[in-house]
Image (cartoon, helix red, strand yellow):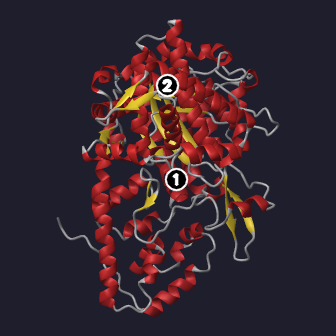
């Protein structure tokens, strides 16, 4: 392999001059937007990407020492990537497009182009210094790893920085001024301090202000909007045409309500696109600000028809939730759909680190209560994770006599009912603290994901008893256990990882499974059901009370990976079992232009 090291040579005076320019900006995001006015030298590129590490090499060391330090950093980076990049299995993201109409084939490339713009915008939110960082990296595999993670932090290793000198990932990502505290935001007089569609900026005097997304990213959003409008002109399905037009308008106004309703009203469309600033996982400071993403989808109408009946059962399942009556008085919306899709393009937030395999939207609680949600199962992505990851994990960590219960249908159902279960439970606190999301702030997402995990399993159990679902309960419970072991490998910096670890530790305490002397896991089917009910009641009570302090306590005590489990997970790595997938995707892969 060719030597891909790079060298940075600069004198002390240049460092001082550069540092003076950088110090004028109080918000790191501002560096990106003013990049063209700053030095374009190799030092600057390294300094923005590597921050203190690059600047510290300019404090009087000789050139030979400075060069050696940078080379060591680059070698260390290449070694880290060599260990971490193989955790991702490459999968070609495609489907059979023969069933699409001529017009749908013309629409598909337009939707993918709009999705690509969402990817660019997510980079600006997650790590706006992308270009300067990549310019310092010559090793192709390292560049791939940076792109997978949308920055210099390893998303599946608890956001560990893997580029020398960048430091910990900011909790507020780049939605807030660098280094600002939660208290400073909370005490500010900003009207939009917890806004979903704005960033907080600080000027040279220290004054805070907010800038709406549609202003900050006006040029990119206008392009994306125009592409959706073009697609709408071609669309034959009336529901899709209406949604595309309204979503195009929403992108340039940050007013998404009308397009969310139109999206739920679509029933006969074959193509779909989920696009815009949607999830708030990236904002770990307040769990308030949303990130750009997109999924381009082709509906599997036959599978979707089979799934339609389950949404109608939500009210009855709600009544029987294993929690006190006051926590289940809400009536879930049933005017929504449960659909299966093949996803043909991921962009932005959903493509960062672990890949989403099912979606439950919209997130607006008012729409959820009035109309419900659409649960979208991404069938081809789900199959890839089952084949490439879940089955190999099961062969290593599930007790031999229970491996027969690992089934794709059970995996599909567990994931599907996880999304359906977001509609169960409680949206408003019973303590007068408003919506659960607002009351729990940054603690909301992980607990909500935990609720969906456990109530999804509760739904499976109930539907099997009613004869509405086929199969053996052992299939669903054992596959759920294997699913936990798959998901906890994402680490506990991310909402789903925290949720899975809470479930793992809670179930272990309740004896729902045991770890054998051989280092394998064996499900106790009777205790599994009991632990499921107990954890369901525990989470619903936390949500209903809106008790943020109690949720923080639960996270600290339960959402952690103990050394024994970590050793077992390390065995999977040594066996070269991938943690997640990375997609080869786009118009060329699909064969459309």
- The image shows residue 371 at horizontal and vertical percentages of 69, 24
Report the residue that reaches farthest toward the top.
467
- The image shows residue 211 at horizontal and vertical percentages of 69, 59
Which dot, 2 or 1, sits closer to the camera? Answer: 2
Image quadrant holding the C terminus, namely top left
Report the residue that reaches farthest toward the front.
517
**Residue 269 appears in the figure:** no
Q: Is residue 304 above or below residue 32?
A: above
Q: Is residue 537 above or below residue 498?
A: above
Q: Secondary structure at mark 1?
A: helix
Disc ID at residue 25 = none
Image quadrant holding the N terminus, namely bottom left
> In this orientation, which residue lies closer to the viewer: 15 or 98?
15
Q: Quadrant of residue 171?
A: bottom right
Report the residue that reaches farthest toward the left.
1
Residue shown at 43% from the left, 74% from the top: 45
Q: Cβ–Cβ below 8 Å for labels 2 and 1?
A: no
Of the image marks 2 and 1, the number of the one nearer the N terminus: 1
Count numbered badges in the picture: 2
Residue shown at 52% from the left, 9% from the top: 465
Q: Secondary structure at mark 2?
A: helix
- The image shows residue 422 at horizontal and vertical percentages of 60, 29
The residue indicated by pointer 2 is 416
Around disc 1, counting alpha carbons within 10 Å, would you say few (fewer than 14), some (14 to 19), or many (20 or more)?
many
Q: Is residue 32 left or right of residue 424?
A: left
Q: Is residue 531 left or right of residue 543?
A: left
Q: Label 2, label 1: how many angstroms apart (C-alpha)?
A: 27 Å
> In this orientation, which residue lies closer to the viewer: 423 or 479?
479
The residue indicated by pointer 1 is 122
């Amino acid at each position: 392999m060719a030597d891909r090291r790079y060298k940075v040579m600069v004198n002390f005076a240049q460092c001082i001059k550069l540092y003076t320019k950088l110090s004028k900006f109080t918000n790191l995001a501002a560096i990106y937007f003013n990049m063209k006015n700053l030095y374009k030298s190799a030092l600057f590129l390294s300094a923005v990407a590597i921050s203190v590490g690059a600047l510290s090499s300019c404090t009087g060391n000789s050139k030979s020492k400075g060069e050696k330090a940078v080379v060591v950093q680059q070698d260390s980076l290449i070694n880290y990537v060599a260990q971490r990049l193989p955790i991702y299995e490459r999968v070609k993201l495609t489907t059979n497009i023969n069933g699409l109409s001529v017009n749908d084939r013309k629409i598909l490339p337009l939707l993918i182009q709009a999705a690509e713009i969402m990817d660019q915008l997510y980079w600006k939110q997650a790590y706006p210094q992308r270009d300067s960082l990549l310019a310092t990296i010559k090793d192709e595999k390292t560049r791939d790893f940076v792109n997978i993670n949308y920055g210099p932090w390893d998303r599946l290793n608890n956001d560990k920085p893997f580029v020398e000198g960048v430091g910990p990932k900011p909790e507020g990502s780049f939605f807030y001024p660098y280094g600002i505290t939660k208290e400073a935001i909370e005490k500010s007089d900003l009207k939009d301090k917890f806004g979903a569609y704005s960033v907080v900026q600080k000027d040279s005097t220290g004054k805070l202000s907010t800038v709406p997304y549609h202003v900050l990213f006006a040029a990119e959003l206008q392009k994306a909007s125009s592409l959706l409008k073009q697609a709408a002109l071609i669309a034959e399905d009336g529901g899709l045409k209406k949604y595309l037009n309204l979503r195009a308008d929403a992108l340039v106004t940050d007013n998404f309500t009308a397009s969310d309703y139109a999206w739920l009203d679509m029933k006969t469309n074959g193509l779909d696109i989920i696009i815009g600033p949607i999830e708030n996982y990236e904002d770990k400071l307040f769990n308030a600000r949303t990130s750009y993403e997109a999924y381009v989808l082709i509906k599997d109408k036959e599978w979707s028809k089979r799934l339609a009946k389950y949404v109608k059962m939500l009210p009855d399942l709600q009544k029987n939730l294993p929690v006190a009556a006051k926590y289940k008085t809400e009536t879930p919306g049933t005017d929504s759909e449960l659909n299966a899709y093949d996803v043909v393009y991921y962009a932005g937030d959903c493509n960062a680190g672990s890949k989403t395999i099912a979606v439950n939207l919209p997130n607006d609680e008012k729409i959820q209560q009035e109309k419900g949600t659409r649960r979208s199962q991404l069938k081809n992505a789900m199959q890839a994770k089952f084949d490439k990851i879940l089955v190999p994990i099961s062969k290593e960590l599930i007790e031999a006599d229970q491996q027969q219960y690992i089934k794709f249908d059970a995996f599909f159902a567990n994931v599907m009912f996880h999304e359906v279960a977001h509609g169960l439970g409680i949206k408003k606190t019973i303590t007068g603290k408003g919506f659960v999301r607002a009351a729990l702030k940054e603690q909301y997402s992980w607990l909500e994901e935990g609720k969906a995990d456990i109530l999804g399993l509760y739904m499976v159990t109930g539907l099997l008893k009613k004869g509405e679902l086929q199969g053996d309960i052992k299939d669903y419970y054992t596959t759920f256990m294997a699913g936990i072991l798959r998901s906890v490998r994402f680490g506990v910096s991310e909402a789903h990882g925290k949720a899975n670890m809470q479930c793992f530790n809670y179930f272990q305490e309740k004896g729902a499974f045991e770890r054998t002397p051989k280092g394998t896991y064996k499900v106790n089917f009777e205790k599994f059901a009991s632990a499921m009910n107990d954890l369901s009641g525990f989470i619903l009570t936390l949500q209903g009370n809106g008790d943020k302090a109690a949720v923080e306590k639960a996270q600290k005590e339960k959402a952690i990976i103990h050394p024994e489990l970590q050793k077992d997970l390390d065995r999977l790595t040594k066996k070269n079992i991938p943690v997640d997938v990375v997609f080869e995707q786009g118009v060329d892969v699909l064969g459309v232009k």
